[in-house]
Amino acid sequence: MKERLPFRAWFYFRQGYGLYFAFILASVNTLTLTYFLAIERYPVLNEVFPSFIHYVIIAVSIGIPLLITVGYLHYKRSAGYRAEAGINNETNPYARRNLVNSEMNLQINLEVLKIIIKLSRNEKIDRFTKWIQSL
């Protein structure tokens, strides 16, 4: 575990930075730059957004529902997410192992069900006993 600690810390650092810190920083940066470099310099836009606070409230009230919709469409309706999930499945050895384990568990459960059915009918289970002992 100790030899993996630096790699785990690096992974958690990237997740925290990429998902939270960079997201918040980029949002604040975008709102600030667009207001002070674009809106403040154009009188027409300055009439629509008289202050930075008005701009933030309007941008957030339109932006959050819009981004939620785009995120939903990406996950539920786009071929892009399906391709991404397929690639992750192909390249992740743990996902492949889960598939192999699931198939093995299914085979074992089917055999156990066959034994239970035989027992409920008071039949002999010699063949299944040998198979289970071979596992």
Image (tube, rainbow, N blue to C red):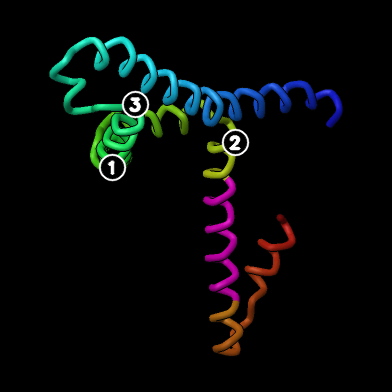
Write down the region rendered in magenta: 101-115
Badge 1 marks a residue whose secondary structure is: helix
**Residue 13 on image: x %, y %:** 66, 25
Q: Is residue 67 visible?
A: no
Quadrant location, the C terminus: bottom right
How would you classify the magenta stretch by its main secondary structure? helix
Q: Position of residue 86 (x, y in %)?
A: 39, 32
Of the two numbered discs 3 and 1 in the rendering, the one whose residue sits closer to the viewer: 3
Residue 58 appears in view: yes
| Residue type at numbered disc 3 | Phe
Label 1: few (<14), some (14–19) or many (≥20) C-alpha neighbours in 10 Å: few
Residue 64 lies in what quarter of the image?
A: top left
Question: Would you name the residue on which mark 3 appears?
Answer: 52
85 or 132, nearer to the observer: 85
Is residue 104 shown above or below 65? below
Residue drawn at the location 72% of the way across and 27% of the way down = 8
Q: Which residue is mark 2?
A: 94
Q: Is residue 131 above or below residue 69?
A: below
Identify the amino acid type marked 1.
Answer: Pro
Question: Label 2: how many residues lie within 10 Å, few (<14), some (14-19) or many (20+)?
Answer: few
Residue 107 in magenta? yes
Question: Does residue 131 show up magenta in the picture?
Answer: no
Residue designated by label 1: 65
